Amino acid sequence: MRPSRTTAQRRRTAAAAVLLAALFLLTLDGAAMAAASNATGRADPGRSARFATFNASLNRAAEGELVADLSTPNDTQAQAVAEVIQRVRPDVLLINEFDFDARGLAARLFQRNYLSVGHNGATPIHYPFRFVAPSNTGIPSGFDLDNNGSVGGPNDAFGFGAYPGQFGMAVFSRYPILRSQVRTFQRFLWKDMPGALLPDDPATPAPADWYSPQELAVFRLSSKSHWDVPVLVGGKVIHTLVSHPTPPVFDGPEDRNGTRNHDEIRLWADYVLPSRSGYIYDDQGRRGGLKPGARFVIMGDQNADPFDGDSVAGAAQQLLENPRVNTSLTPTSPGGPEQAALQGGANLTHRGDPAFDTADFVDVPGPGNLRVDYVLPSKNLRILDSGVFWPASTDPLFRLVGVFPFPTSDHRLVWVDVRVHRHR
Ligand SMILES: [Ca+2]
Ligand SMILES: [Ca+2]
Ligand SMILES: [Ca+2]
């Protein structure tokens, strides 16, 4: 694709990649290190890479509980989550709702005790590269953000959560993560987004005053975090842009969560457009977004369906109608339409195609099943195939998704295969 590039240059790039990979491996535990040498898996890894997002509901009520659960191989939910991953076999995987711990123990234990163990005949899968970082969930803001008259608790944290890191995120990759180039946007302030949809207290005449100036001076846009995690695939850098915007509900007429959800989605929509990304700064103080021509895959539970549910109108369209986002193929499943018909309720009045659904929410009274989880490559990456892991009830693997109470999660894994260039 770049004819000016010489073979020697390519060799140098390849050598640098190998060196980089070796450096990262030094930081990993022995099990992952051993796995790195045979991290092949896909039938033709030189042709395509599979990107996936999965809100796996690996969150627990108390701090340390997820690490405790993953310390043994006996957690039945984690076993089922691991089997879903082993069946789909993503190359780069975002897990939403994976409680954060500063040492990355939960991610390491999930690999060792669950992903590295075959479940019900599925082949184990090894991710030599992992990335976790702090989440705004459960970090006390010191302010009465929900205006209930007292300070403290999950609703007054920078992101909803009972303890720091609850409902966090983790990236697992079979390709090298360019760790020194990762950017995080945990502390970007909502007020610093031009034209932010700051919520209004309808009980007062002043506009956009749900949050006081003192609160806005510290209010972080991201309810969890936003990470730009570059991975090296086939000699090319692909920026995985991951996040988990707040659900647009659990608030009042001020719609503070709906407006925040909209603007959390907007951060990535702006980040990929050089004409609009100038205001963005990361946690290291560097400004701006992706360069023109950069490759990316936006992944995560965006908590917004383009047609149904309670998000601000147009929230999901910020990504789906973004000039740099490739929507040539929408992931579908056989289970989505089947369950929408079986479950009825709100599903009967939905405008969106149930084949695109990715989450099984309450139907009466409730939003019904929605499309909220997305894997959206850039236009300069060709989409080869895609899907939502939601088997029909006649499929033996239906046991991995089930119906409420779910064996894994109320969300389904979504995957997209993109073409990667061969380098010989
Ligand atoms: Ca409060
Ligand atoms: Ca007001
Ligand atoms: Ca449902």
Image: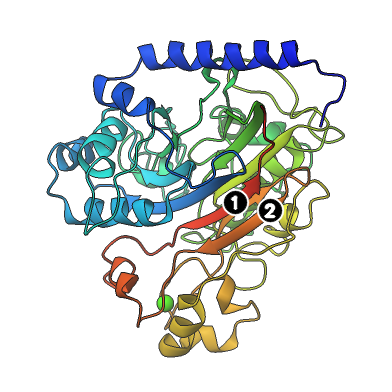
Answer whether labels 2 and 1 touch (C-beta < 8 Å).
yes
Q: Give the residue at mark 2.
A: 383
Q: Is residue 126 left or right of residue 223?
A: left
Residue at the spot 71% in from the left edge and 52% down from the top edge: 319
Q: Is residue 319 left or right of residue 254?
A: right
| Residue type, mark 1 in image | Asp
- In the image, residue 261 sits, relative to residue 19, either above or below, namely below
Give SS at disc 2: strand
The numbered disc on residue 34 is: none
Could you tell me which quadrant the C terminus lies in? Answer: top right
The numbered disc on residue 417 is: 1
Residue 278's quadrant in the figure? Answer: top right
Could you tell me which quadrant the N terminus lies in? Answer: top right
- In the image, residue 100 sits, relative to residue 121, either above or below, namely above
Judge: label 1 CB < 8 Å from ligand 3.
Answer: no
| Residue type, mark 2 in image | Ile
The earlier-in-sequence mark between 2 and 1 is: 2
Residue 236's quadrant in the figure? Answer: top right
Residue at the spot 68% in from the left edge and 24% down from the top edge: 281
Q: Is residue 17 visible?
A: yes
- In the image, residue 380 sits, relative to residue 88, either above or below, namely above
Q: Position of residue 31 (x, y in %)?
A: 25, 25
Q: Is residue 281 left or right of residue 113?
A: right
Q: Nearer the viewer, residue 29 or 99?
A: 29
Q: Nearer the viewer, residue 340 or 134?
A: 340
